[in-house]
Every structure is written in C-alpha cells, then in structure tokens.
Image (cartoon, rainbow, N blue to C red):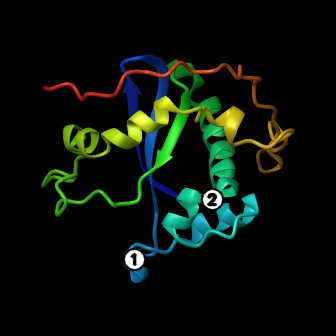
Amino acid sequence: AVSLCMVVSHPTSDETGCLLMLRSDYLSGGLALDEAGLRLASKAGSEATTVMSARQCVLFRRGLAVELEYVNHQIAHHKIQVRRFQILREDLSIANGLLDEDGNINRARVLSRHRHIINDMYNHETRYPSKWLLPGAESSPSRGGRESPALPQARVPSPAPFVPRRP
C-alpha cells in the first residue's frame, strides 16, 4: 500500500518519523488507492478508497500503524524505530521538483515543501501506538498473533518549528 517512505527527524525530538506516499491506481489519475491499499483499508475496517480519504481516516491510519509496527520489528537490529508518520497527499515527481531527473528524492525540496506536515507530526500527539491503535490491538492476527512490545505513552513536549538544514 505504501509506495514511498522518507525517514525524517526533528531537531527537538529523538524519535524517528516518516513521510509516506500511498500507491494509487494510475487509471484514476492518482486519486484512488491501489489494490494493496484497498486490502489494507478493508482489513482495518475503513471505507477509504482514495488517498485523501485514507489520509483522514482513523481506521486506515490504525491499520497502517499496525503494519509499521511489524516493520519496526523487522528493522530493530538497525537501531531505528519509526514512531511517527504522516501520509502525503501529493506524488513525488520530476514535474513538481520533488524527484531529480534520475528519480532520486530531492530531500531538501521535500523537507522545505512539507515543513508544515513535519512540524505537525512532532507538535501533536501522533506517536502512533498511543493514538492509532485500538485497545488490545497490540497483537495483529494477520501477523500470527505476535505481540508488539509495550511502548510508553509519554506526552511529547511541543518542539520548535522545523527548519531544514542547508547542504
């Protein structure tokens, strides 16, 4: 369901976040979720069918959080754990300047254009285990009932606004 994940951080937090772009159906002009996104929505009990509705749907975000928690278990040996996420509403492309001609992400432009989303991600209580998971959802049946580790549900202090570093 996710086509791109760009890891981000914030100068006032030691938590890792990511900006996600959902895969969309090419024939719909990039508006409708692709089959994987629709399966995730169905599994989560969400009626989301478009990227925008998925972005705003609490049930879809909870389903995505469960999947990210599974990914965190897979990458635990790298000493990185994604604790925050936001879904982007626009595709990264060469036309909008967010991809270079060779297809690589232009991080500086993405960070600059989506500064408000990153600030929002760190200014609000978006640590997904405490906000997006339903009580008792720490065990995902789709993952064989494996338990996710208990994560603290601490309040995050309000950080300063994000200012991208200049290369």
Work out whether 160 lies above or below 134: above
Which residue position is annotated with label 2?
57
Work out whether 19 lies above or below 119: below
- Observer-side mark, 1 or 2, equals 2
Three-letter code, disc 2: Cys
The one of 148 and 108 positioned closer to us in this rendering = 108
Q: Position of residue 70 (x, y in %)?
A: 66, 38
The one of 130 and 73 positioned closer to us in this rendering = 130
Which residue position is annotated with label 1?
26
Q: Position of residue 12 (x, y in %)?
A: 41, 17
The residue at the point 39 percent across, 76 percent down is 26
Work out whether 27 lies above or below 137: below
Q: Quadrant of residue 11?
A: top left
Upstream in sequence: badge 1 or badge 2: 1
Q: Position of residue 146 (x, y in %)?
A: 81, 36
Q: Is residue 66 left or right of residue 127?
A: right
Furthest residue in direction bottom, as rendered = 27
Crowding around mark 2 (Cα neighbors within 10 Å: few <14, some 14 to 19, many 20+) is some
Quadrant where the N terminus is found in the figure: bottom right
